[in-house]
Image (spheres, helix red, strand yellow):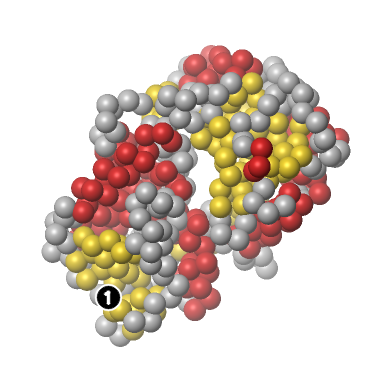
Amino acid sequence: MRIAVIGFGAAAIGLLERLKDSNHELHVFEKSNDIYSSSISGVRSDGKLFVSNEMGGEIYIDPLLQRRFVDYYINFTEKREVETGFSFASEEYYRKFYEKGFLPISSQFFHIGTDQLKEVLYNIYNQFGKSRNIKFHFSTLITELKEVSDGVLVNGTEKFDMAVVAVGRSGHKLINALIMSSPQIVRNNTKVDLGIRYELPNHIVDDINREMYEFKVKYKSRTGYMVRTFCNNPSGFVVTENYDDFITVNGHAKMHLKSMNTNFAILVSLVLTEPFNDPIGYGSYVAKLSNLLAGEGKVILQTYSHFKESKRTKNLYRVQPTLEPDKYILGDINLAFPRRIIESIIDFIENLNTVIPGVANNDNLVYAPEIKFYSNRLNNQVSSRLKFIGDCSGATRSIIYATAHGYLMAEAIEANNFNVDI
């Protein structure tokens, strides 16, 4: 078959790895100019890999397959140099959090680091480039996919036997266009996570960073919303993330260059009911409102005490931001976020402070917006010619799960099983 693969990220990597040197002709379309400028945000930023069945996606991925892809990425580094950790392997830590109302999430972590990821991605790309059946098309933005009687038209011109969409969360415009033309592909579209990126000095969280590198916990706040930590970065850096029409905040850590701060996301999970059907639109609206207040290309930065008191921050004190000065403005996040979201985050931080003293210090830093889009959960059984893999499908939300999802879809294609439910 002649197959169009839309986007080159984690999910596409899993698909290509299984189908390289097969009898299928694979054409990979990527909007970036080349591999160096590629916006493979899920893979390029931080490179945190984990093995767990408690997070990472809405489908089951065999832990052995997860570990296989962890090793796959690590093997593309020059020296196989990674930082590792086990979240809540210690019963003492587990009980400590559990007693305070938190639900600890167990997982095994492998951290490659942002500074090694360019090398990893380039090496993977080079390997695929040696396969006779894979052809890359950079600087190619796909805006339209249309099913016809004997295939799929890409951008209204070139026809393929099938198309596999692997555009990640940043490809929401294409996904929205496909949903508009074929609403039956949507299984579920009610969930979005709104929150902040929290930054504090390393010494406050040194013990837990040493114990497990990344801690992941959930907490049911007094508002009724579930709040969770995400993407902990010991000695890391806060960065911005560009979604084309709005800017969000994110975090990462490097293998060799270290800061004096730790940052992590605090996210409030919203599961809304009918007639709500546009979680990406809702999250985007909140992000754009925050950007409107911060100014073009910037996010809002506030101290925790001012965040609690709904006051604009005008000066910082002991904690200095790792985000570049031209990327933020001191302001008031309360002007952009719904009050129940703010109250949920404050409740989470105050309770976390009972387990880790100092987390609620007045001069710790709060950045916004941090938003995690779950994407609409799409149904891969609707069409045999158009398939969705990775984060854009709503089935995954991590590097390893997305890679494995692409691999499993490739196995289904090889087996000619187009009705597989993944």
Residue at 61% x, 31% y is 322
Work out whether residue 95 or residue 164 is closer to the camera in this orientation and state it: 164
**Vertical placement of 260 versus 158: above or below?**
above
Viewport quadrant of the C terminus: bottom left
The image quadrant of residue 229 is top right
* Residue 332, image x, y percentages: 80, 43
Residue lying at the far bottom in this picture: please name it. 149
Residue at 53% x, 29% y is 236
Kind of element beneath mark 1: strand
Left or right position of 209 against 97: left
Viewport quadrant of the N terminus: bottom left
Left or right position of 25 against 167: left
Residue at 40% x, 52% y is 38
**Vertical placement of 296 versus 99: above or below?**
below
Residue 5 makes an appearance in the image: no
* Residue 166, image x, y percentages: 39, 59
Work out whether residue 45 or residue 90 is closer to the camera in this orientation and state it: 45
* Residue 392, image x, y percentages: 46, 58
Left or right position of 97 against 23: right
The image quadrant of residue 384 is bottom left
Work out whether residue 179 or residue 39 is closer to the camera in this orientation and state it: 39
Residue at 30% x, 51% y is 13
Q: Which residue is mark 1?
A: 160
Near mark 1 (Cα within 10 A), the count class, few <14, some 14-19 or many ≥20, is many
Q: What is the tally of numbered marks visible in this picture? A: 1
**Vertical placement of 74 versus 142: above or below?**
above
